[in-house]
Image (cartoon, grey):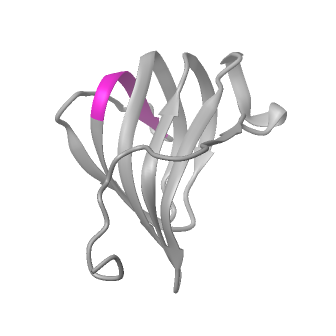
Amino acid sequence: MPDLFLTVTPDGTPETTRPDPEKVIEGDPVFTTWNLEERDGLYCGIWESTPGTWAISYDEWEYCTILSGKSVITDAEGTAHVVGAGDSFVLRPGFTGTWQVVETTRKDYVVRL
């Protein structure tokens, strides 16, 4: 029943993007995204980024699990959170700071607008 079950595996042609140039602090990060679901304000899939640092600002809820790599998420107060394979966390609306990909990072995510 394809409407009830969806395998969370990168499949098909991914979308390749970069952060807005004005948000980039260091490097030239490239994002690769396999969107698995996009409806009713819910988005989920697999996201990957090459090394670099950029400013982040969340208007939505995001739950994710790091599948591979290493990143440092630093909040506006300067508190750094190192995340790697197996780490899960939530970024809430209003969160601002930076995302630094130290080693190419892949995560699965669920975003709720």
- Tell me how many marks there are: 0
Left or right: 97 as drawn, with respect to 67: right
Q: Image check: 108 left or right of 40?
A: left
Q: Is residue 52 above or below residue 83?
A: above
Q: Does 2 appear in magenta?
A: no
> Residue 40 vs residue 110: left or right?
right
Whole-percent x and y of residue 30? 65, 26
Point out the stretch of residues depicted in magenta: 67-75
Residue 77 in the image: above or below residue 12 = above
Q: Residue at x 82, y 32 (%)?
A: 21
- Whether residue 63 sits left or right of residue 96 in the image: it is left
Residue 35 lies, in percent from the top left, at 52, 56
Residue sitting nearer the eye, 30 or 96: 30
Viewer-proximal residue among 12 and 34: 12
Magenta residues, dominant SS class: strand
Residue at the far left in the pictured view = 86
Can the viewer see residue 5 in this picture?
yes
Question: In the figure, 38 relative to 98: above or below?
Answer: below
What residue is at 22 percent from the left and 28 percent from the top? Answer: 85
State the quadrant of the N terminus.
bottom left
Return the residue found at the far front. Answer: 1
Quarter-of-image position of residue 86? top left
Q: Quadrant of residue 105?
A: top left
Q: Return the x and y of residue 50 as percentages of the image width and height.
A: 55, 20
Q: Is residue 73 magenta?
A: yes
Quarter of the view holding residue 58: bottom right
Rendered location of residue 44, percent (x, y): 43, 62
